[in-house]
Amino acid sequence: MREKDLLVKDIGEFSLIERLVEVLGPAARGAGQGVIRGIGDDAAVLQNNPGTRILASSDMLLEGRHFDLSYCKPRQIGWKALAVNLSDIAAMGGRPRWALVNLGLRPELKVSLVEEIYAGIAELAEEYGVIIVGGDTCSSRQLIIDICILGEAYRSEIVYRSEAREHDMILVTGSLGKSAAGLAYLRGKNQVQLDPDAGEELLGAHLQPVPRVHEASLLIRSGMVNAMNDISDGLASELHEIVQASGCGARIWVERLPLSPGTVQMANYAGADPLDWALYGGEDYELLLTIPGSKGAPLKARRLSNSLKKATGTSLSFIGRILPFPGVELVYPDGRIEPLAQGGYNHFKNSAT
Amino acid sequence: MREKDLLVKDIGEFSLIERLVEVLGPAARGAGQGVIRGIGDDAAVLQNNPGTRILASSDMLLEGRHFDLSYCKPRQIGWKALAVNLSDIAAMGGRPRWALVNLGLRPELKVSLVEEIYAGIAELAEEYGVIIVGGDTCSSRQLIIDICILGEAYRSEIVYRSEAREHDMILVTGSLGKSAAGLAYLRGKNQVQLDPDAGEELLGAHLQPVPRVHEASLLIRSGMVNAMNDISDGLASELHEIVQASGCGARIWVERLPLSPGTVQMANYAGADPLDWALYGGEDYELLLTIPGSKGAPLKARRLSNSLKKATGTSLSFIGRILPFPGVELVYPDGRIEPLAQGGYNHFKNSAT
């Protein structure tokens, strides 16, 4: 049988694990970076830096739900599975350090495809200094990539979603709705004529999002961040989570929401409202944060925005304010104010797995 | 709609998560036990005891592969999903502390069933002082329960599989093959007449295995354990892992393998060889360990066995010796010696998901 035609069911679980460890390279075998024992025992043994707290989060990507092999490259799927987890650690103010990767694999999948998924994980892991220290593989009906990420942070660095305060300025990194626009582009690719750069930008946002790890680190070091979330389920949902956890409310100005020209162009093609994508699209993995809104705050925010842009190339937009009373309001350009429903992506109600 | 008929697809992801947090009770919300922030932010924030190392492992249970709703109670499925993870931490010599639970749910499942699964997780978690600190839920084609467990241990307590040494005595807790016997019993229940106690014992071993956390802790405290594994993939597979990691070999005496009367009785009914179940059945979650085999070792092993039995009710059997050359040999009662293949449960080659 030719190597490239080899299927998961043709080789044993142990051979597959050996191949995946090969893909990870020497970093997976050796000690270092707090790894006392990595893959190859009942559990990994890890050493966090003295005085740090452990951050832990896990996210599962499912075939037919979060990705589709017909338009996602295996390498992108692996990348994204780790990226969404890195994003969670970044949003807490931590440094991602170690990951455990559980795979559910259809027996008919090619081994080379699984290796490509792993290569995508390994590529992003290397970029952010994350070591894959364990995992599990088993046979399943749909492709499952489930990653648990561990990070660390000193107490003073950790940012909770529950610490937003009245008058805080609400800021967001990058632009919103790009992932939803990218998905719409993918689905109608043959009918849509986008500017090539815009097309690449939207596809990248959906298929291979860059977690805002460096941005979060820089924002935290400013000492200004009160509350922070990453935007996995859409701005509306994440904002509701912040105000509910913090016991306050928020007002957002529609005209301040950062939309890329490509997103607007794609929405026009698709007959969709780019505002819907920005508020409810989800999977943008941008950071949503609040900083104190005291006197001089807008100037400070502008300085923060400039230094973020300079250091990382990522923009930071002032989109609203924290209010003392519950609920989230949306202010339209004509002055109209409407309540913003929590909405956001809901894994069961939109169900069509 | 009546509460008991409510389906996963009838309620949103956020309502479902709220219900599951309810099932966990107040322990999931409050701080304490090293939990600075549990469920409800982008990541959990955890504080390990100063000087400890972190142990991390993850295991996924899949419907149709590891369990079947037609003969497993939802509560048992939840229990087992956590138990297999606790077993990994125990086998390293650690204390399990925190867990993240990812669920993939078919939209047609009853909410009450999912709550029962969670109740099984919560029951076992409470018994061992483990706090559920996070997780993810999404819609899937088959029921998925994926748990990442975190534990801690001081350096001196950690036991690796790679530290077996020539002449070591090989010991195993409890009895072997019970889980495979339990599965055979479940599948042919209406045709098989077992002694009721034996039936319960086998069913328990398969459906609701008790992780050997207390046993591992006591064994570690003896200071005698060189190498240890939990038996998830069958004795043969785990033993090969120990000798390969340790650069040695092993000899096992067939007549010393602990088989319960119920396992032997069930094998007779099924026309199976109980030795096959003991060596290759897997899912026994017993501990396989080695202790130094120097002069006086058998006496020490007997004392260790007695104190384990007294403290936990669990037996400890001397089943073989570590040899200086590679490979594993099986010695039959008639003196015949044969190589023992690694075999064990293989998630892809036995594929019938």
Image (cartoon, coloured by chain):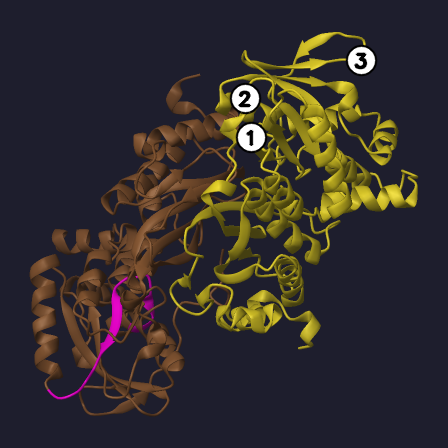
Chain colours: A yellow, B brown
What chain letter is assigned to the residue under label 2?
A
Q: Residue at x 57, y 57 (%)?
A: A106
What chain letter is assigned to the residue under label 1?
A
Q: Amino acid at mark 2?
A: Arg
Instruction: Give whichever of discs 1 and 2 has the lower sequence position.
Output: 2
Tell me which corner region of the image, top left, top right, bottom left or bottom right, holds residue A263: top right
- Camera-side residue: A66 or B187? A66
Res A226 label: 1
Q: Is residue A312 left or right of residue B207?
A: right
The local crowd at label 3, few if under 14, some if 14 to 19, many if 20 or more residues have their Cα within 10 Å, is few
Tell me which corner region of the image, top left, top right, bottom left or bottom right, holds residue B212: bottom left
According to the picture, the residue beneath numbered tag 2 turns out to be A165
What chain letter is assigned to the residue under label 3?
A
Res B263 label: none
Residue mark closest to the camera, 3 vs 2:
2
- Camera-side residue: B156 or B18? B156
Res A333 label: 3
Magenta stretch holds residue B283: yes
The quarter of the picture where the N terminus of chain B appears is: top left
**Do labels 1 and 2 touch, CB within 8 Å?**
yes
Q: Is residue B110 above or below residue B270?
A: above
Q: Is residue B107 at least partly visible in the picture?
A: yes
Q: Amino acid at mark 3?
A: Pro
Instruction: Give whichever of discs 3 and 2 has the lower sequence position.
Output: 2
Q: Residue at x 53, y 61 (%)?
A: A132
Q: Is residue A101 at least partly visible in the picture?
A: no
Magenta stretch in the rendered image: B279-295
Q: Amino acid at mark 1?
A: Asn
Tell me which corner region of the image, top left, top right, bottom left or bottom right, holds residue B134: top left
